Amino acid sequence: MIFLKSKEEIEKIRAASRVVVEVLRRLKQEAQPGVSTWDLDRIAEELCISMGAVPAFKGYRNYPASVCFAINSEVVHGIPSKKKILKEGDILGMDFGVCLDGFYSDSAITIPIGHVSPIAQRLLEVTRNSLYRGIEKAYPHNRLFDISHAIESYVEQEGFSVVKTFVGHGIGRSLHEEPQVPNFVPHNGNWSKGIRLKAGMVIAIEPMVNVGRPDVRILDDGWTAVTVDGSLSAHFEHTVAILEEGPVILTQFEE
Ligand code: MF3
Ligand code: CO
């Protein structure tokens, strides 16, 4: 069941998104060599609550923290830890969501810590660009997999690979709603183009891109997804409303 959102409901998701953007902006400032992901999680949770919002991930399927981090070959869902201390040259994914006034918003960025290698820099650019390639297809009357195909074909053209294990999602009164939004065109023997997009849909598009092979495995903590081949991985996510006029990025991050 896909829930179409009214203008008023989209405004509520926009209000939740403002908190998400503020928190990610603050995390981006605070993420420096010597800082732990545990420190960052504390900062995020405190700022979120001070803005009247509830961290969306804490307690979700027993996830123990407010932010999901991913350093270097970690793909997504890394649990904050005092032992995870940032160092120059790392790339750091930060995924954060909130619930405000009954509506959710969800966004992720991956940032360089100081100077990073040329390949890391390229990975960040390609992954961010792939998100925007997908968003550009989020028009009413297009098909869902137009988004997926735009992301996948761009990433592969750039020589990187798209993670297939996790997907984006509808979002609204729940963190995860239908439809699932894959970053690749699924073909189970058929070549479906996916559902037709409609004005009022709100979706979180979240490509995860690896430098090497697409395969991931989950560490013994039950959460942290890492690349099997140890290659670098990046993740960007926006919550996007599909309006008659086209896509509106509710979690736009002002530089
Ligand atoms: N952006 C991720 C998602 O939408 C974050 C969820 S992590 C969890 O699936 F901790 F909430 F599970
Ligand atoms: Co998400």
Image (cartoon, rainbow, N blue to C red):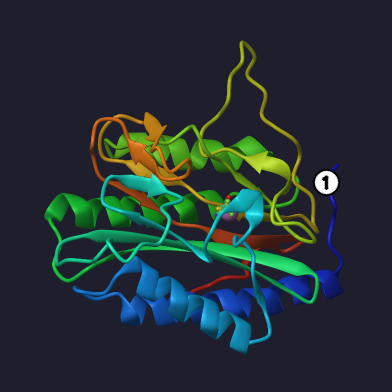
Residue 75 image offset from top left, x and y in percent? 38, 45
- Write the residue at 48% across / 77% down: 44
Kindly tell me whether residue 138 is visible in this rendering: no
Q: Nearer the viewer, residue 116 or 40?
A: 40
Determine the image quadrant of residue 56.
bottom right
Furthest-bottom residue in this view: 50
Furthest-top residue in this view: 189
- Write the residue at 76% across / 55% down: 201
Say which amino acid is labelled 1.
Answer: Ile
Residue 3 image offset from top left, x and y in percent? 85, 52
Disc 1 on helix, strand or loop?
A: loop
Is 50 rendered above or below residue 205? Answer: below
Is 253 rendered above or below residue 243? Answer: below
Q: Is residue 68 left or right of residue 103?
A: left
Kindly tell me whether residue 240 is visible in this rendering: yes
Residue 218 image offset from top left, x and y in percent? 42, 36
Residue highlighted by disc 1: 2
Ligand 2 within 8 Å of disc 1? The answer is: no
- Write the residue at 47% across / 47% down: 207
Q: Is residue 193 left or right of residue 35?
A: right
Quadrant of the rendering where the C terminus is positioned: bottom left
Residue 22 image offset from top left, x and y in percent? 51, 82
Disc tally is 1
Q: Is residue 207 left or right of residue 88?
A: right
Determine the image quadrant of residue 53.
bottom right
Q: Residues within 10 Å of mark 1 (few under 14, many from 20)?
A: few
Ligand 2: which quarter? bottom right
Quadrant of the rendering where the N terminus is positioned: top right
